Amino acid sequence: MRSADERPRAEGGDGPSARPLTAAGAGGFVERHGLWDERQHAAAGQLRRVIDELGLERVRFSFADQHGVLRGKTLTREAVPGALRSGVTAPSSLLLKDTSGRTVLPVFAGGDPLVSGRFAGAGDIVLVPDPTTFRVLPWADRTGWILCDVHHPDGTPAAFCPRGLLRGQLAALAATGYDLTVGVELEFHVYRPAPAPGGFAPVAVGRPGAPGPAPEVAPLSSGSQLLHEEGLDRLDDLVDLLHRGLTGLDLPLRSLELEFGPSQLELTLDARDAARAADDALLARAAVRQICRRNGYHATFMSRPAAAETASTGWHLHQSLRSRSGGEAAFDPAPGETLSPAGRHYLAGLLAHAPAATVFTTPTVNGYKRYLPLSLAPDRVVWGIDNKGAMVRVVGTQGGGGTRLENRSGEPAANPYLYIASQVISGMDGMARRLDPGPPVTDPYDAEARALPGSLAQALDALDADPVFADALGRDVVSWLSTIKRAEYARYLAHVSDWEQREYFDLV
């Protein structure tokens, strides 16, 4: 029987409302549209047992929006059975907003082809929980968390659901005989909020299109000392909090490291299946921010905050293919070679489509301020063998297998699903057309090499000019993302910055 759980209440499930979560009422939205597979039905049964036995009282039903930010609702224990059967409704306009919370597309005016029908009037979408993602939050009392996929009320997948978009591209890759393995390296900054007059900080109230002022913060470390053991030891309380929180979520944490910039840290996660790695990255970011906030810190995955003069943060995405038939590593080279033919073609695809793909790897205005010459960040579309200045670094060529490609161009604020999907699309095109990446470079900042886009606007122009992403994702998806990002960039251009005020106000 599918995950039916008719047991009496478990001894550990305390609280006045603790009771068995039964299979009664089958035939809800999930069952009616066949949205779960057998693995998810089995996971739902285990989820019910955990809620009962631990006495959980709340569960967060969340999804990743277009910016890779978690949105959703917290449901009481009593509401969980219904949400598992029929999902949770939310306004569809959540998928049409820029980073300030402003709805970019005209949901009430009508006439826009991206809005009409599915999103007109800001009608509902349905958040369908994926029980395989359920976790108990270590930092929130009696609270669970579950990741959702987004569907329309008729049961069809929402075209603008990032998690669904990645799943579609991984299915296309699987049809060619390969699966993708991804390893995540996320850099971030952690600060101590600066003391406020009176001992408390006022809420920074803003509005859609005009966020409130950023919090005042102070650095935790001086920077300039990469991997300094004593520097990390000074942050041991913070490291312990993050270690316990991240491992408590069953995330495959490998390391927590002190990076080069002031208050700059890095976390790395074990490599695993791409879809699961994307979920891991999403939850790791949310966990870091929430754990820090609850303990008097401020964490940000913004690439180049104002206090980060010496080093920006990046997201280094390690990727490799394996054969679906036998599980063999597909990038491992023959003796005397750097990469297998499949690896060379995949790499060439990453390079060929890099300018357009930066919309996905570096989706914020701020992220382009990281592309600096003679730094540990790339600014050119080149590849190298174990060269940390190159956009793509080939790693693991010294024998022993495990050859992989490390794309160093991404920013840590990127949407995990769209970032990884852009790599799959680019790499598959390289393999389909048997592209050649050319020779590796030893000077990754050679002025003659093709530059990465210098701004979000340039990247969006490159995306419009490169049909491979519209062919893979659909023209509507590319138009949707471009419309939101162009509106975001237009707001940036219209803003009078502190630089302009300093430069001109007293001069002219």
Image (tube, rainbow, N blue to C red):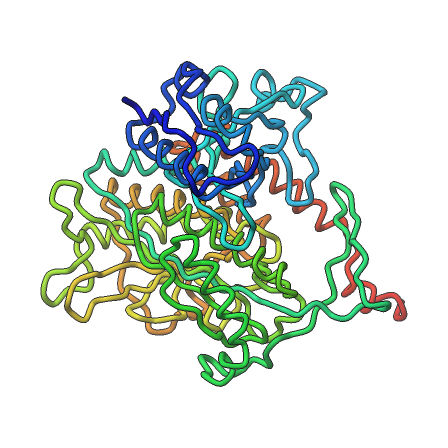
Q: Can residue 468 be seen at all in this image of the molecule?
A: no
Position of the N terminus by quadrant: top left
Question: Percent x, y for residue 300?
Answer: 59, 60
418 or 347, which lies in front?
Answer: 418
Q: Residue furthest bottom?
A: 230
Q: Name the side, left or right, on which 397 lies relative to 380.
A: left
Q: Residue furthest left?
A: 335
Q: Quadrant of residue 2?
A: top left
Q: How many marks?
A: 0
Q: Quadrant of residue 367?
A: bottom right
Q: Can residue 400 be seen at all in this image of the molecule?
A: yes
Q: Residue at 32% x, 69% y: name it.
A: 441
452 or 124, which lies in front?
Answer: 124
Question: Percent x, y for residue 143?
Answer: 53, 44
Where is 436 relative to 259, above or below? above
Q: Residue at 67% x, 19% y: name it.
A: 121
Question: Percent x, y for residue 439?
Answer: 26, 64
452 or 236, which lies in front?
Answer: 236
Q: Residue at 49% x, 79% y: name it.
A: 232
Position of the C terminus by quadrant: bottom right
Where is 180 relative to 266, above or below? above
Q: Name the side, left or right, on which 150 lies relative to 439.
A: right
Where is 168 relative to 296, above or below? above
Question: Percent x, y for residue 280?
Answer: 41, 50
Q: Residue at 48% x, 75% y: name it.
A: 258
Q: Name the side, left or right, on which 210 lies relative to 231.
A: right
Q: Residue furthest front?
A: 11
Q: Quadrant of residue 505?
A: bottom right
